[in-house]
Image (cartoon, grey):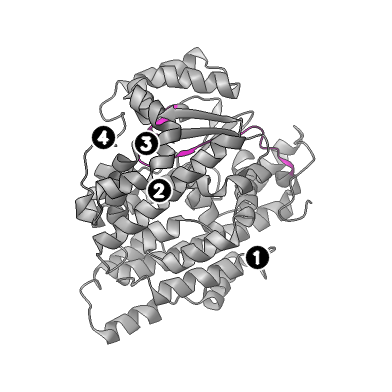
Amino acid sequence: MPARGATPHHHWKPQDELACRRVIEQTAYPVRCSILQGGMIALSDCTWSNSSSHATTRQIWPLDPETLMAAALHKTGQRDFSDRSFIEPLNHLLRSYAEEADLNAFGRAAARYDVMRGLTNMLLLDMAEMRCPEIRRRSIDRPVFITGFPRSASTFLHKLLSLDPSIAVPRTWELIYPYPSWDRVGAAVRKLQVEAELWFFSALSPNLAKLHGMGADEPQECIDITAQVFQSTRYNDQFRVSGYQHWLEKYGHDQAYRFHRRFLQHLDARVSHQRWVLKAPDHLFALGSLLRTYPDAQLIFLHRDPLQVVASAAKLTEAVQRPFTRCRDRFEIGHRVSSGLIRAANCMVDAAGHQRNILNLSYHEVVAHPMETVARIYERCGLGLSREAEGRMRRWLVRPRSRSRGGRPYSLKEFGLNGEILDRKFARYRDAFGALYRRAS
C-alpha cells in the first residue's frame, strides 16, 4: 500500500472493481447523533444568556481533541488513526473556537458534530483501505477544477456540467456519509437525512436558501473534503475563526490536498470511467498544492466585477454565520470578505502569468450563454459532449430557478465598505481581466 500522501504510481485494474464494491457494502457507517438532533436540542437552549448556561453547553458538547478522538475511535471500533497529521490543525481550530468564535449553543453543537464527522470519516477510510488496498491505486486523471471569484456562477456551472453522465462530481450527502451501507436503501436513507439537516439549517438562516441553493444530491465544494482533516477556509466563513485562518495560511495546503486525493479515490471506487469536475473558489489560495497533487489538472477561472462580488459574498457570509455565532458585526464581515477577495484577485493575476492550463470565463457569459460555455470547456478539457448530456443540460436550463441567483444588487455600505477605496485595491485585477468581464456584460 502506498505511503500516506504519496501519489500512487500503479494503475487501477479491472479485477479490483469487484473487491472494492464488496468493501463498500461491508463498511457500514456508525450510528451517531446528527446535526439535526443536536440542533433541535441546541435550539431550545438559544435563549440561554448567563455564564452558567454557557458552561452547561460546554459540558454537553465538549470540544477538546482527546475526548473527540476517543469518541470517534469508540464508535468505529478502531484502535488508532493510520495518519495522525491532522492533530495540529485540529488543535488550532479548537483553540480558535474557544478564544474567538463566540459560538452559541447551536454553534457549539454543530462544531462538535463537524469535528466528529471528520474524525469518523478518516477512520472509515482506514477501514476500507485495510480491506481493499487497491483503492489507493486508483488514478484520478485530468480532473477539472472550477475556481475564481465566488458569487460568479460557479455553483450554476458545476450543476450544469454534473448533468453529463460521463462526469463525476462530489455530492453533498457523499461528503457527509462516504460509507453508508452502500445498498440503494442505505444511500436513500442518508440522502433523506441530509435533506432534513439542510432544511433545519435553512430554517435557522432563512436568507441562505435565497442566496445559495442547497440539496443533498447537489454537487458540493471541495472545501468540505479538506475540512475533514481540519484544513479548510470553510471554518472561518462558517464559524468566525480568523486566528485559525491566519495559521492555516502559513501552514500550507499540501497535506490537505493529499487527503483530498485520497478521499476522491474512495468516491471514485464506485464510478466507472468518469472524469471528475470539482469546484471551490478557495482553490485559488492553494494552486501550488493543487498542482503538486494533480499535475494534469485543468483549471477554470471565473471572473466578475469585484465590487459586485464583495457585496454578494459579504451577504452570503452573514447568512452562513448567523446560526452559529452570537457575533453580529457586519463591518467585521465586510473587512474580512473584502480582504480575502483582494487576495484572491491577486492570486488569479499571478497564476495568469505562468500557468498555461487556465480557461478564463466571465460570470455574464456563463449565465447568458451556458451551452456555448459548455462547448468551450469541453473543447479545452478534451471532453466529448454526447447527445444525452446535451439534452439533459438543455432541459435543466429551461426549468424555473435553474439560472444563477447571483444577480441581486447588494450594498457595500451596510458592511462598512467604500466603493471607491475598494475599487482602487482591485486595480491590478481590473487591468488584467477587466476587459473580459466588461465585454461579456
Can I make out residue 385 in this image?
Answer: yes
Residue 343 or 179: which is nearer the viewer?
A: 343
Viewed as shown, does residue 269 lie left or right of 409?
right
Would you place residue 309 above or below residue 398 in this image? Answer: below
Residue at horizontal 51 percent and vertical 44 percent from the top = 347
The picture quadrant where one finds residue 99 is bottom left
Residue 407's label in the rendered image is: 4
Q: Quadrant of the C terminus?
A: top left
Q: Amino acid at mark 1?
A: Ser
Q: Nearer the viewer, mark 3 or mark 2?
A: 2
Q: Residue beneath label 2, please?
A: 341
Crowd class of label 4 (few under 14; some 14 to 19; many from 20; radius 10 Å): some
Q: Earlier in the sequence, mark 1 or mark 4?
A: 1
Give the spatial CA distance, label 4 vs label 3: 9 Å
Give the spatial CA distance, label 3 vs label 1: 34 Å
Residue 85's label in the rendered image is: 1
Q: Earlier in the sequence, mark 1 or mark 2?
A: 1
Q: Earlier in the sequence, mark 4 or mark 3?
A: 3
| Magenta stretch contains residue 103 | no
Residue at horizontal 67 percent and vertical 70 percent from the top = 79
State which region is magenta.
Answer: 137-160
Give the spatial CA distance, label 4 vs label 2: 18 Å
Percent of width and height locating residue 114: 45, 62
Give the spatial CA distance, label 1 vs label 4: 42 Å
Q: Residue beneath label 3, please?
A: 152
Percent of width and height locating residue 17: 70, 36
Q: Secondary structure at mark 1?
A: loop
Q: Earlier in the sequence, mark 3 or mark 1?
A: 1
